[in-house]
Amino acid sequence: MKYIFVTGGVVSSLGKGLAAASIGTLLEHRGLQVILQKFDPYLNVDPGTMSPYQHGEVYVLDDGAETDLDLGHYERFTHVNLSQVNSLSSGQVFENVIKNERAGKYLGATVQFIPHVTDEIKDRLEMVTERNRDTDVIITEIGGTVGDIEGHLFLEALRQFALEVGNENVCFIHVTLLPMVKAAGEIKTKPTQQSVAKLREIGIQPDIIICRTEHHLDDDNKRKIAMFCNVKKKNVVAFRDVENTIYECPLDLRKDKIDRLVSDTLGLESKSPDLSKWQGFVDRLVNPSKITSIAVVGKYIDLNDAYKSIYESLTIAGAEHDTAVNVVKIDAEDIEKEGAQAIIGNVNGILVPGGFGERGTEGKILAAQYARENKIPYLGICLGMQIATIEFARNVCGLAKANSTEFNKETEHPVISLQEEQQGIVDMGASMRLGSCASTVYPGTKSFELYGQADTIHERHRHRWEFNPAYRKKLEGGGLTIASVSKDEGLVEIIEIADHPFFIGAQFHPEFKSKPNQPHPLFSGLIAASLENS
């Protein structure tokens, strides 16, 4: 097994995740099998209970693991299908160490950061290795910035691990920032030098340095970085700001042949990559022949990462239709104040994403009503499906006080209610309906058509509240179509309105299964319908 460890320096949000994902893309195109994972130094067990304003979206895997959005990049950029073992936090590490101590597994020893905590981190690497014996390379991104106190134990564990498996089987890649000082008119390499020096103090010598820069990285600066950071000049790689889309990142890193540098460092034999299909996908993104506008009505709209997979799925589906997607970001609370017509205006489609809590929900309900009454293509995801159900119950079926028990526990008509198995749950972490679930799609529905007439689908979930089956007959009588139910419990998964060009609500999260050149059917259908509505 070969290992790549991606660390970051100088500042956060440099794009380590995109760098790791892009390297995965390039190695796959060289014919190698890769797996990716993320080590996060924060003390939360996982990001499931973290605010989107703190952390961005929570990305859910097939097995229900709630993870960092970077795992979304990993799955979109490669063919990997990740699981909970591919996401490790300090919270998980310390939780396991304490459990082991309480169980007497350390045989009375004094429990210390080294070796017990670092051993726990190395155990995860060994576990992933054991489960992926057919894989050529494991790529691990280390969250945070070198020099942060919380990340030190992870780096120490990696130093030990590299010695144990042999340095010839490990490639350390350090992603760093090259700032431009305008007054001096030149790129400064000193922060990179200091960051690498911090790594070397720990005992890690990077093999490759990826330099994030807005400007051209000339040979003089490459030579300077190489000399002071003790790497070969050819191993100093520019990672430039891409002009149009993050899917240009693998093509940019390929300019400096990072895949060849990694292969040489690890002694891997592989073919030159054929990136023609990836380039074709990027070309459709950059030079589309059509354009459509989709209003995304949410409550975390000020933070782009809160709906990261939603935006990427729209972009990917747009590329399939040779279409640029103009995403109109709308705060649901603004609709509550001024009305849907005034805020949403003329768009080709409307999407209401998931979320929790009462804030902004009435604005989302008005958005769903606006889409229904004006025949605007609508896709509701998770809460967006529940919102559409509430709106239909109120304004079509005459249940004026219909609501979700999430927002009003005493509502007269709880068309959305807490799942029975969720009753009495106190712990908030990892206690929702999570992960992939098999569902039956009914023939004769729009969803059946979109899924290619597949009668069984598997989609990822993250929610506590559900369509209340006590109201199914009443809502169906008003014209609501139940297009899909879960195979085991019979829970409503997809709703539709038959006499509407495109009105679909999905209880699951289709955005977690879109990939370049493989858009999710519901997103593809939304874009197609929005083009017809142009």
Image: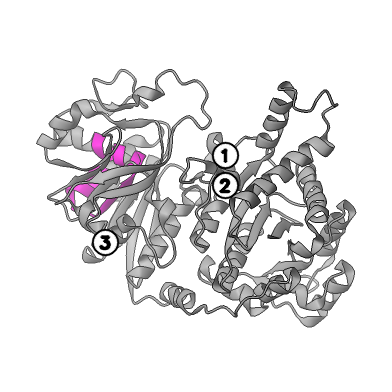
Q: Mark 2–mark 1 contact, CB under 8 Å?
A: yes
**First in sequence: mark 2 vs mark 1:** 1
**Magenta segment main secondary structure:** helix
- Few, some or many residues within 10 Å of mark 2 (<14, 14–19, 20+): many
Circle nearer the N terminus (1, 3): 1
Q: Earlier in the sequence, mark 2 or mark 3?
A: 2
Horizontal side, residue 194 vs residue 257: left or right: right
Image-quadrant location for residue 320? bottom left
Cα–Cα gap, marks 2 and 3? 31 Å
Residue ID for mark 1: 47
Q: Position of residue 437 (x, y in %)?
A: 37, 41
Q: Determine whether, in the image, residue 1 is placed left or right of residue 202.
A: left
Q: Which mark is residue 32?
A: none
Q: Residue at x 54, y 71 (%)?
A: 248
User: Tag 1's secondary structure?
Assistant: helix
* Protein image colouring: one colour
Q: CA distance from mark 1 to mark 3?
A: 34 Å
Q: Residue 418: where, in percent of width, then height?
A: 35, 25
